[in-house]
Image (cartoon, rainbow, N blue to C red):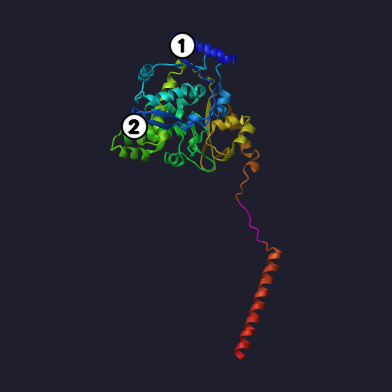
Amino acid sequence: MKKKTILMAVALFLASQGIKAQVVEDEGYDDENEITVTDNQGDEEVIEFPEAMAFELDSLLNHYMSKAYLTEDNDCRMKDVNPVFEKEVYIERLKRIPSVIELPYNDVVQKFIDRYSGRLRHSVSYMLGASNFYMPIFEEALETYGLPLELKYLPVIESALNPKAVSRVGATGLWQFMLTTGKQYGLNVNSLVDERRDPVKSSYAAAHYLSDLYKIYGDWNLVIAAYNCGPDNINKAIHRSKGVRDYWQIYPYLPKETRGYVPAFVAANYIMTYYCEHNICPMVTRLPAKTDTIMVSKNVHLEQVASVCNIDLEQLRALNPSYRRDIVPGLTALSPLRLPQTEVGKFIDREDSVYNYRADELFNKRALVAVNDDQPMYTSKSSSSKKSTRRSKSRSKKTVTIRQGQT
């Protein structure tokens, strides 16, 4: 209560200086997953939020990289006071963002900016901290394909930078690849491996996919929308709007979530650029230790590596997120194992011990089995009894037939 009173006093002080502000309660989520906007004709329209905008903050902070390398900024003084600005301020700020992709302002975009700067401000704080892990990977992949770097904020709305995110329809990883699309772009998925969860491989696959979409549409807003709902839905919307190829014109014909997707992208670029103006403090980041990759040609379980090399198992899982059951299937194909750089030599020195450690217990699938060909006694008796019965019936029928013939 005391904290809220102080925050209200700060908001009143800002108001006296001509700055509007709102006090934001601690972040908590309910079932609200859509917004209502009013169009120029006064009609109300419901737009769904992208699924990641409903993730709970606790789930974002629960994976290894967050627990190990992110901490809250305790020096942040007004983290629960959100200044509110006139429309012209937002328009001018969006114009100043260095961007190839147009970042226009409208009432729908404003709703998403309000969401990020208000209820989701603590999630934004997490994403700003986590961006130190992931943005260099995204930027490198986008640069490789010659794409606008502002696309690096797509995972903000796709997964809230949660590398373990799985949507209600099965889209997986930072870039939320569906199974079919992931395989189409070279991501291996089977019972042991899901490369959609690998930040590096999925980023290059996403960049390749975005590049292909741009070759189709030649318009980044349509590309971003197609990334969300698929080219088929975009093509149908274009067809229904008599061939118009403008996202904001085909808008009424798009799925509900896709209507909010491009506005969310604009808002994500805004909030990841102007977070300071909304008193959002990035979580303090300690960069992880450098890592290195070795290729293994035998099956190895992460528990074997953790125990023999004395490495935290959760750290190994975080470094090797594509292995679904902690098994690196080197026997299937030469497979990468990512380790802290300081531990690579230890693994090489102890490699045989690693492979042998609890191998029978951790790899209990049998390569060769013998079939039991013994004849159980009860089967023989049952079989003999049935044969005897059949013979008896056969003789009885034969006898009856002869008698009838004689008669």
Q: Is residue 332 magenta?
A: no
Residue tagged by mark 2?
Answer: 247
Is 19 or 195 nearer to us in this picture? 19
Where does residue 321 sit, x and y in percent of width and height? 53, 34
Judge from the rendering whether residue 69 lies leftward or rightward of residue 240; answer left or right. right
Task: Tell me how far mark 2 sits from mark 1, CA to CA.
Answer: 38 Å
Measuring 64% from the left and 33% from the top, which residue is drawn there?
A: 307
Magenta residues? Answer: 368-373
Where does residue 254 sit, x and y in percent of width and height? 37, 36
> Which amino acid, by three-letter code, is at mark 2?
Tyr
Q: Secondary structure at mark 2?
A: helix
> Which amino acid, by three-letter code, is at mark 1?
Ala
Reply above or below: 304 against 100: below
> Predominant secondary structure in magenta?
loop
Which quarter of the rendering shows the N terminus?
A: top right
Classed neighbour count for the residue bearing mark 1: other residues with Cα under 10 Å, few (<14), some (14–19), many (≥20): some
Q: Is residue 306 visible?
A: yes
Judge from the rendering whether residue 259 lies leftward or rightward of residue 306; answer left or right. left
Residue tagged by mark 1?
Answer: 15
Where does residue 6 sit, x and y in percent of width and height? 55, 12
Reply above or below: 68 against 166: above
Is 358 or 263 nearer to us in this picture? 263
- The part of the image, by quadrant, that contains residue 373 is bottom right
| Tally of numbered tags | 2
Q: Which mark is residue 179?
A: none
